[in-house]
Image (tube, rainbow, N blue to C red):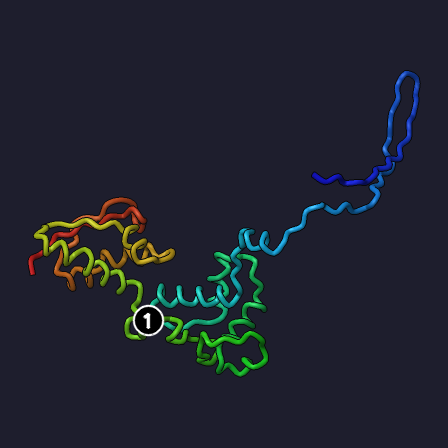
Amino acid sequence: MEELNFSITISLTLTLKEDKASINIKNVDLIPAVVPLPYRLNSRDRKDLPKTEKKTIHDIILQTAKRYVVDSGQNKFTGAKLFHLSLLNHPGLKRNSFAAQVISAAPNHPSHRHYPNRKDYFTYLGKGYYKMNQKYLKIAEDQILRPSDRVRDHVKRNYIDPAKKDGKKTLSIRAGDIHKELGLSRRIPVVCSALRSRKLSKNCDIELTYIGGPNNSANTTYTYRLNKD
C-alpha cells in the first residue's frame, strides 16, 4: 500500500448572531492541485481491458445499402435514401459527412478523388443514384427478388411443398414467422399482402380459406386448403 501526500486548506467565516452561529466556506485549496494515483496501466493491463466496438460511417453505409437491396429487391438507391435509413439506428449521423462518404465509396463518381479513405462499394449511376457492387452484395443480380416474391418463394419451398409432401390437407401460416425467417425490417404489410395474394394461391395450387387475427399484423394467420398436385 502506498501513501498519497497532499494538504487541503479551507477558508471560511464564522458569524455570530444572538444565540446562533453560522459558518460560510469561502474557498478550498488542494495542494498539489492534482494528485497522481500510484498505479498506472502497463501494456499488458491495456490489452485486458474490454474493447468497445465502434462502427465507422463506411461500415454503416455498407450495411444499410445491403439491407436496402435485399429488403426492397432493387439494386438502385440514392445517398439520401441510405442516410434516412441509417438514421433509424444511428440518430447522431451528420448529413453532409454521410453524403461525402457515400461519394467516396463510388470510384466512378466525378468527386471521388477529392475524398480520403476511398472505397469501392458502389457504382455511380448518375443523377444521384448508386448501385452496390457485386463483390459486396454477394447476391447475383438475377437472384434479387422483390419482397413479395421472396415471401411467396419462401412459403412455397418451406411450407406449402413440404406440407403437400406430408399429405396435409390444410396449413396455417403466421405473418410474423415469415417476416422473422426472411430477416425483413418493417415489412409486415408486404408479407400479409403476399400471403393473401392470388399469385401465391395460383402458383402453389392452394386456396385461402380463412384469415385470423388483426389485419396486417405479425399475428395475422392465413389458413389454406392444399390441393393435390
Horizontal side, residue 191 vs residue 201: left or right: right
Quadrant of the rendered image containing residue 22: top right
The residue wearing badge 1 is: 139
| Residue drawn where x is 53% and y is 65% of the image | 57
Q: How far from the left and from the top, in percent, is residue 156?
A: 19, 60
Identify residue type, mark 1: Ile
Q: Is residue 159 above or below residue 95?
A: above
| Residue drawn where x is 54% and y is 71% of the image | 101
| Residue drawn where x is 48% and y is 79% of the image | 127
Element class at badge 1 = loop
Residue closer to the observer: 108 or 189: 108
Q: How far from the left and from the top, in percent, is residue 175?
A: 27, 51
Residue closer to the observer: 227 or 99: 99
Residue closer to the observer: 154 or 59: 59
Query: In the rendered image, which quarter contains the N terminus?
Result: top right
Quadrant of the rendered image containing residue 141: bottom left
